[in-house]
Amino acid sequence: MHKNSNATTTLAVYYGKKHEWHKSSLIEIEGNKIINYDETAKSDSNLTSVFIGFSKPRIFEYIPSSKVEYSLQKDVFPVLAKEGELNAFLFNSNWLNLE
Protein backbone atom coordinates (compact mmCIF):
# COMPACT_ATOMS: atom_id res chain seq x y z
CA MET A 1 0.00 0.00 0.00
CA HIS A 2 2.60 2.60 1.02
CA LYS A 3 5.12 1.71 -1.67
CA ASN A 4 2.54 2.26 -4.41
CA SER A 5 1.21 5.54 -2.99
CA ASN A 6 2.49 9.05 -3.53
CA ALA A 7 2.20 9.87 0.18
CA THR A 8 5.31 10.73 2.15
CA THR A 9 4.18 8.63 5.12
CA THR A 10 1.66 5.89 5.86
CA LEU A 11 0.68 5.25 9.48
CA ALA A 12 -1.12 2.31 11.04
CA VAL A 13 -4.43 3.58 12.38
CA TYR A 14 -6.56 1.62 14.85
CA TYR A 15 -10.30 1.75 14.34
CA GLY A 16 -12.95 -0.01 16.29
CA LYS A 17 -14.22 0.29 19.83
CA LYS A 18 -14.27 3.85 21.11
CA HIS A 19 -11.68 4.57 23.74
CA GLU A 20 -10.64 7.62 25.70
CA TRP A 21 -7.09 8.27 24.55
CA HIS A 22 -4.53 10.00 26.71
CA LYS A 23 -1.27 8.95 25.05
CA SER A 24 -2.06 8.41 21.37
CA SER A 25 -2.69 10.78 18.50
CA LEU A 26 -6.23 11.28 17.27
CA ILE A 27 -6.82 11.58 13.57
CA GLU A 28 -9.50 12.31 11.00
CA ILE A 29 -9.53 10.56 7.66
CA GLU A 30 -11.16 10.82 4.23
CA GLY A 31 -10.73 7.55 2.40
CA ASN A 32 -7.18 6.50 3.21
CA LYS A 33 -5.90 10.08 3.60
CA ILE A 34 -5.29 11.47 7.08
CA ILE A 35 -6.65 15.02 6.90
CA ASN A 36 -6.06 15.98 10.55
CA TYR A 37 -3.43 14.67 12.97
CA ASP A 38 -3.66 15.92 16.56
CA GLU A 39 -1.09 14.86 19.14
CA THR A 40 -2.72 16.95 21.87
CA ALA A 41 -6.38 15.90 21.53
CA LYS A 42 -7.71 14.02 24.52
CA SER A 43 -11.21 12.86 23.72
CA ASP A 44 -13.23 9.83 22.75
CA SER A 45 -12.49 8.49 19.30
CA ASN A 46 -12.48 5.28 17.34
CA LEU A 47 -9.51 6.35 15.17
CA THR A 48 -6.00 6.69 16.57
CA SER A 49 -2.50 6.49 15.19
CA VAL A 50 -0.45 3.77 16.85
CA PHE A 51 2.81 5.32 15.51
CA ILE A 52 3.79 2.38 13.34
CA GLY A 53 4.43 3.41 9.79
CA PHE A 54 6.54 3.79 6.72
CA SER A 55 8.04 6.94 5.24
CA LYS A 56 9.75 7.84 2.04
CA PRO A 57 13.16 9.53 2.36
CA ARG A 58 11.63 12.93 1.58
CA ILE A 59 10.29 13.02 5.14
CA PHE A 60 13.65 14.46 6.12
CA GLU A 61 12.82 17.56 4.05
CA TYR A 62 10.21 18.37 6.74
CA ILE A 63 12.78 18.43 9.54
CA PRO A 64 14.95 21.55 9.66
CA SER A 65 18.64 20.67 9.84
CA SER A 66 19.18 23.45 12.38
CA LYS A 67 16.76 21.91 14.90
CA VAL A 68 18.18 19.62 17.56
CA GLU A 69 14.77 18.60 18.91
CA TYR A 70 11.95 17.95 16.51
CA SER A 71 8.90 15.73 16.90
CA LEU A 72 7.32 13.71 14.11
CA GLN A 73 4.03 13.64 16.02
CA LYS A 74 3.91 17.33 16.95
CA ASP A 75 5.83 19.01 14.14
CA VAL A 76 5.81 16.84 11.00
CA PHE A 77 2.66 14.68 10.85
CA PRO A 78 0.20 17.60 11.23
CA VAL A 79 1.90 19.35 8.28
CA LEU A 80 1.89 16.18 6.18
CA ALA A 81 -1.84 15.76 6.91
CA LYS A 82 -2.62 19.31 5.79
CA GLU A 83 -0.58 18.78 2.60
CA GLY A 84 -2.28 15.46 1.75
CA GLU A 85 0.98 13.56 2.28
CA LEU A 86 -0.15 11.33 5.16
CA ASN A 87 -1.98 8.06 4.52
CA ALA A 88 -3.74 5.68 6.90
CA PHE A 89 -3.55 1.90 6.97
CA LEU A 90 -6.64 0.91 8.97
CA PHE A 91 -6.64 -2.12 11.24
CA ASN A 92 -8.84 -3.30 14.11
CA SER A 93 -6.89 -6.16 15.68
CA ASN A 94 -5.22 -6.17 19.09
CA TRP A 95 -2.40 -3.76 19.86
CA LEU A 96 -0.56 -2.59 22.94
CA ASN A 97 0.68 0.93 23.69
CA LEU A 98 4.23 0.55 25.05
CA GLU A 99 5.45 3.33 27.28
Image (cartoon, rainbow, N blue to C red):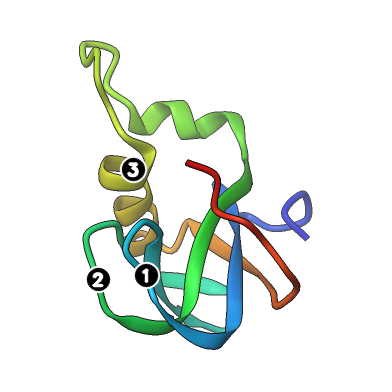
Position of 8 compared to 53: left or right?
left
Cβ atoms at labels 1 and 3 below 8 Å apart? no
Label 1 is placed on what type of residue?
Trp
Seen from the viewer's position, the closer of residues 91 and 10 is: 91
Cβ atoms at labels 1 and 2 below 8 Å apart? yes
- For label 2, the residue is 42
**Badge 2 local density, few (<14 within 10 Å), some, or many (20+)?**
some
Quarter holding the N terminus is bottom right
Query: Residue 15: horizontal and vertical position, in percent?
Result: 59, 80
Q: Is residue 7 visible?
A: no
Label 3 is placed on what type of residue?
Val
- For label 3, the residue is 76
Residue at figure coordinates x 21%, y 11% from the top left:
66
Query: Residue 18: horizontal and vertical position, in percent?
Result: 48, 88
**Badge 3 local density, few (<14 within 10 Å), some, or many (20+)?**
some
Residue at figure coordinates x 55%, y 45% from the top left:
98
Position of 31 compared to 37: left or right?
right
**Badge 1 local density, few (<14 within 10 Å), some, or many (20+)?**
some
Q: Which mark is residue 21?
A: 1
Mark nearer the N terminus (1 vs 3): 1
Above or below for 99 versus 27: above
Mark nearer the N terminus (2 vs 3): 2
Label 2 is placed on what type of residue?
Lys
Distance between the alpha carbons at the discs numbered 1 and 2: 6 Å
Above or below for 64 versus 11: above
Distance between the alpha carbons at the discs numbered 2 and 3: 19 Å
Residue at figure coordinates x 55%, y 57% from the top left:
50
Q: Is residue 12 visible?
A: yes
Per the image, label 3 sits on a secondary structure element best described as helix
Per the image, label 1 sits on a secondary structure element best described as loop
Q: Which mark is residue 83?
A: none
